[in-house]
Image: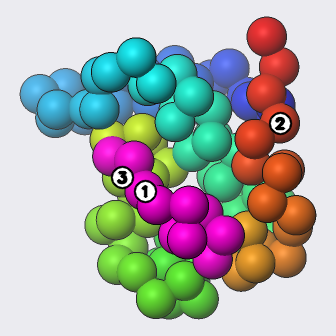
Amino acid sequence: MIVDRKFHFRYNNYQEGEICMKNKNFDTWLAIGLNILHYRKEQGLTQIQLAEKCNISRTYMQKIETAATSCSLDTLIDIAESLKIPLKKLFEFKD
């Protein structure tokens, strides 16, 4: 996974008081969100721009990136296609 540890810390401590998706798959969703963030930043896209390409709201995109919510496989496919990357890139994790 292409995870920047400073982002991991930032997102783990995201807006105190906000309820994050804390379940057995939280770490996986966090890793996916960080990968989305990485590829989005690499391409110079804002959350708004990527969200528009995927036909979702910026708020929903933010929640996906920060693991505050999960999303459907269809949404992940749309995100990967909008980023012009293979879907599997969103699932490349390092231990």
Name the residue located 50 percent from the left edge and 49 percent from the top edge: 65
Q: Is residue 53 left or right of residue 63?
A: right
Q: Position of residue 40 (x, y in %)?
A: 70, 63
Whichever of labels 2 and 3 marks the residue nearer the N terminus, that label is 3
- Magenta residues span 69-78
Whichever of labels 3 and 1 marks the residue nearer the N terminus, that label is 3
Say which amino acid is labelled 1: Cys
How far apart are the alpha carbons under marks 1 and 2?
17 Å
Q: Quadrant location of the N terminus?
A: top right
Q: Main secondary structure of the magenta part?
A: helix
Q: Position of residue 47 (x, y in %)?
A: 51, 70
* Residue holding disc 1: 71
* Residue holding disc 3: 63
Q: Quadrant location of the C terminus?
A: top right
What numbered label is drawn on residue 83? none
Question: In the rendered image, is residue 46 in sight?
Answer: no
Give the secondary structure at mark 3: helix
Out of 54 and 7, give the one closest to the viewer. Answer: 54
Out of 95 and 41, give the one closest to the viewer. Answer: 95
Give the secondary structure at mark 2: loop
